[in-house]
Image (cartoon, rainbow, N blue to C red):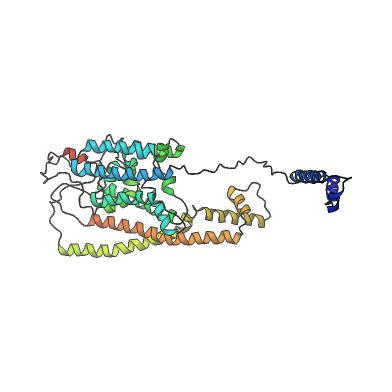
Amino acid sequence: MPAGKESEMRKIKPLPAKALKTPAGKTATTVILTLVSATLSTAAMAVQRFPKPEFESAYTQPQTLVPLPRGEFLAWMDVFVLVVSLSIVTWLVLKKRSRLLVFAMSVFSLAYFGFYREGCVCSIGAIQNVSLALFDNTFALPLSVLLFFILPLVYTAFFGRTFCAAVCPFGALQDLFAFKPQALGSRLNTVLGILPYCYLGLAVLFAATGTDFIICRYDPFVGIFRFNASFGMFIFGGILLLSGVFIARPYCRFLCPYGVLLNWTSRFSRRHITITPKECIQCRLCEHSCPYDAIEIPVTSKSPESRPAMVKKMMLLTILVPFMVLISGYAGSRMQDTLAGADSRVKLAKEVMALSVMQDAGNSIQDDSFEIKAYKTSGKTESQVYSEASAVLKKFYIGGWLFGGFIGLAIALMIGGRMIPVYRTDYVTNKGRCFSCLRCVDYCPVKS
């Protein structure tokens, strides 16, 4: 404000009460109008003294997004469709035994859960939400997400992997590309079968520490469902689909972390799909019908192993399992710094430390990173940043032990499963690996 105007404003004083009674001077109305005019003038000058801030940068305030009113309704509608789909597919698998109808249901699931609901909410990604809720009591887990995680496991525990047969949109999409699937053999299946365990362990570790949701970040198909995949993820998804022409469902068999949980629960299912509704007549027509190598052929040529040989194997496994768990757990703990490097709090601590070292050396940084700019405006001290990073490193040290031990246990059990022979007289499905797709049923001449 100019100095002249400010001095004039200071000269304005309240009029004495007797002025309102002066008949020859100003009337009361004139005095009131004068006071109102002075007040408005002061307000106008106050606006000039405190102008609105002007942002010279290109920053634009992001628009606040409010969930649509139908968001919760759609979530519960998804749960309803999931229950109905699981029930219908289970009935088609166990009662109707119709491959054609199961395929039709998979097309519906691909259209609804895939392209219409854009792959979200999905049971696979729900692993991360459940893991975070278990280790962070401040995270509110939506009930609909919890049901998407639990319901397929419940159905699988009773009826086998009917969720994989025709409800999961990821499996349905890959099933469309399985034109000439080739068998990979039991050894290669075993080696590649360890990858889902690694993926599951890392997904739980990163989610439990609040680092990242890697299943969603590196999902190869959601970007396709939404038509907005990055170039890298589009290539990754395309490679999986093209390889699925010869290797049926590569993601489901060798990457899907939720498939590990379905594999475990399916082994306890009492009403699992069978190749034949009655006794096997040993026609061998189904022997090479399964593109997922999930049919166990009869093993009757060997005589049962001697008791001393079985005792030696059991002793070896008794030593092997804890040894593998301890060695793998130690290796996982040694990966503490590497795994924690993906956490934003650890990244910030490293950048702050590097900035401090450069400042102590008298060097200056021309352009700060986004993280450093946010740190400078947050009001945090270096000690607070380092303390947060230290807490994260401690979590990853414990998580590394658990992750490594989990992988070691999985490898030891896989080795043990190959060491102990199982003798069978019929062609049966491997409950863990079978997707209940009913391809083998079409080859069986016994229909009822």
Task: Where is residue 214? Give x, y as percent.
Answer: 43, 48
Q: Quadrant of the N terminus?
A: top right
Task: Where is residue 177? Give x, y as percent.
Answer: 31, 35
User: Closest to the observer: 390 or 379?
Assistant: 379
Task: Where is residue 145? Give x, y as percent.
Answer: 38, 49
Horizontal arrangement in the rendering, residue 278 relative to residue 68 (left or right): left
Q: Can you say whether 227 is above or below 72 in the image? A: above
Displayed quadrant of residue 242? top left
Task: Where is residue 368? Give x, y as percent.
Answer: 62, 48
Q: Can you say whether 119 is above or below 359 in the image? A: above
Displayed quadrant of residue 182? top left
Residue at the (36%, 43%) spot, across then down? 77
Residue at the (23%, 46%) spot, across then down? 294
- Confirm whether residue 258 shows in the render: yes
User: Closest to the observer: 325 or 111?
Assistant: 111
Horizontal arrangement in the rendering, residue 91 relative to residue 448 (left or right): right
Q: Can you say whether 158 is above or below 394 in the image? A: above
Residue at the (27%, 64%) spot, across then down? 318
Q: Quadrant of the C terminus?
A: top left
User: Closest to the observer: 171 or 185?
Assistant: 171
Displayed quadrant of residue 244? top left
- Confirm whether residue 292 shows in the render: no
Horizontal arrangement in the rendering, residue 9 relative to residue 147 (left or right): right
